[in-house]
Amino acid sequence: MLGIVSNLASLYKTVQFYSRSYKVSTREKVSSYTAVNHIVVGSSLWVPAIPLIIDDKKFLRFDKSRLAVAKIICAIVSLFIQLILILKWFHIQKSNSSAGVDGYVPNYFIGIGVLAIITITAAPVTLCATSFLKPCMPPSFFTMTTLPCKDWDDIRGNFLAKTLQAVFAAYTGLVIFSTLTFGLFVLLYYPVAAQLLLLDGLKRYLDQEKSFRMILLVQYRKLQLLSRLLNNAWRDPAMPFVVGGILVLNSTSLYVVLSSSEKIPLPVLAIYSVGAVDTFVMIQHLFKIVSYPYTRSVDFINAARRGLKKASRWEVKYIVSCFPLKVHMGNGTFFDRSTSLVACSTALDLLVTFLLL
């Protein structure tokens, strides 16, 4: 417990601010992004804290040892401290913005981190409540297969059986949503934010002395390698599967909320509402943020080409060979300014199709 508190306290100290007139190097600006990312990673890896073990007979049962109880208490306390810490970051940036000081971690980065933690917390709770109150109604598929259900409103099983099944459903939901959050935030969103951070630093120092400008141009080539590594990690069919899954999940969740809000119980409605909100944020904000490396790298290359008159022959050939940073979507496409709008239009068309069925 003391180790968790001290670790979070050290992360809190990494939140730094700089005035508009003061120039900060890119190395100094990595820490706070890393702190926010560290909190999301800690929340998504909260699954091992659940006191479930497999005994010698291959049965899943509770771990009643004192160490397991201590672990889950520390994990819950750590989760609340993380939420308080992120809200404190919002307060610090808001209080200092009026004094002419801006935090270099954008509010949208922290906001999506808060949404990720809320999703990891809220989804297992609603699954647990649904499996206990309505064990014969989706998405309680585990209880539906183990209990002799007649219809969705049927309530089967004794208190202990429903409790165990509800805990198992919560654990399953925690594993699924933690994996999705870790993949999208840590493996996609954070690398894009790191690219934007380095690109902003290169653009800020582009107009300085000639020797330093040559070093920056070489650094841009390294940034291109980072972009290629990200695209290799999300190569086909990973990225098309993620984009298509987000669109289908958004349309399906909105369809259930709009057409069946009076027929399904509140926990099930809460699950679909969380899915609709999360996917809407991904379409409107995450897709737009992922397109920033392309738009801002185009501005950087254009700014470098405007200074070709002061560049050497080697720099002219080098700048001509530079290409914008792209996050590929598959089939030769990539995220740009219109991706969010096109994705939203596709999701709405799919929703209208569902409503007309």
Image (tube, helix red, strand yellow):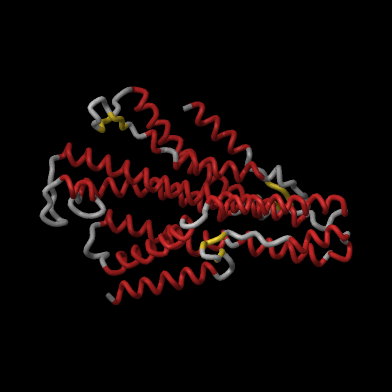
Residue 94 shows in the view? no
Given residues 335 and 38, the one toward you in this image is 335
* Residue visible at 51% across and 62% down in the picture: 330
Q: Which residue extends farthest bottom?
A: 356
Q: Is residue 36 left or right of residue 219?
A: left
Residue 203 coordinates in the image, percent (x, y): 75, 57
Against 4, is 37 above or below? Answer: below
Q: Which residue extends farthest top?
A: 66
Against 141, is 71 above or below? Answer: above
- Quarter occupied by the C terminus: bottom left
* Residue visible at 37% across and 43% down in the picture: 175
Q: Is residue 218 left or right of residue 276?
A: right
Residue 321 coordinates in the image, percent (x, y): 75, 61
The mark tally for this picture is: 0
Residue 168 shows in the view? yes
Residue 165 coordinates in the image, percent (x, y): 22, 41
Q: Is residue 73 left or right of residue 311?
A: left
* Residue visible at 81% across and 67% down in the picture: 306
Given residues 286 and 79, the one toward you in this image is 286
Given residues 290 and 95, the one toward you in this image is 290
* Residue visible at 59% across and 53% down in the picture: 192
Residue 262 coordinates in the image, percent (x, y): 24, 65
Given residues 6 and 246, the one toward you in this image is 246
